[in-house]
Image (spheres, helix red, strand yellow):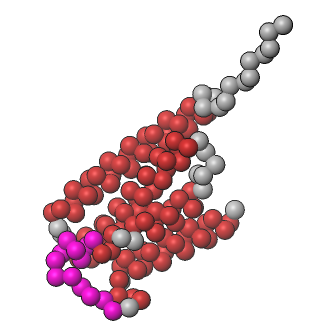
Amino acid sequence: MIWRWIVGTVLVVVAVVYAIDPGLFGADERPADLYEAIERRVKLGGVVALGFFVVHGGWRAPWHRIAAAVVGWFAAGYLLVRVIGIGLEGHEQGQWIFVAIEVAMMVACAWWVRRVDAGMAEGIDTPAAPPSPDR
């Protein structure tokens, strides 16, 4: 499924390039507040997350694994773009709280996905065989 890699990579690259230079596709109105300057970049974290999820391709798994993967990828996308914003705009104390929350979300989701994968490997998440009819 090469199309997943191509579409996902294009989404991630375009979002990261636009996060690095928000004025690339139009007028760049730089906010006076440092917090707002970083947050205008963070909006692209959803596009990065969508690209990560498309490349990951985990939509054929049980719903709870998909939910954990989506939340984890969104945390990763927002974290990546937030760190780019902090690096380019400067240090802002409130942003580091969001970084810590996003890292915690990623760790929790990674733990959950690994737990579900381990259960699937042991056959716990597979449907049970239908009971045999009593005669």
130 displayed left or right of 15: right
Q: Determine the residue positioned at 60% across, 52% down.
A: 59
119 or 70: which is nearer to us? Answer: 70
Assess whether residue 38 is covered by the magenta stretch.
yes
27 w.r.t. 77: above or below:
below
Residue, far bottom: 27
Quarter that holds the N terminus:
bottom right
Q: Residue furthest right?
A: 135
Q: Where residue 50 sits: x, y (%)?
A: 50, 64
Q: Quadrant of residue 10?
A: bottom right
Q: How many marks?
A: 0
Residue that appears at 39% across and 71% down: 44
Above or below, 115 against 50 in this view is above
The residue lying at 43 percent from left, 40 percent from top is: 111
- The image quadrant where one finds the C terminus is top right
- Residue 124 position, x and y percent, is 60, 28
The answer, for residue 110, to whether it is visible in the render is yes
Task: Say if residue 90 shows up in the picture.
Answer: no
Residue 28 image position (x, y, % from top left): 30, 89
Q: In the rendered view, does 57 fall on the left or right side of 52? A: right
The answer to whether 23 is drawn above or below residue 17 in the figure is below
On whether residue 36 falls in the magenta region, the answer is yes
69 displayed left or right of 108: right
- Point out the stretch of residues depicted in magenta: 27-39
Which residue lies at the image location 68% right of the left edge and 66% below the top edge?
A: 2
On the picture, is 129 further left or further right than 115? right
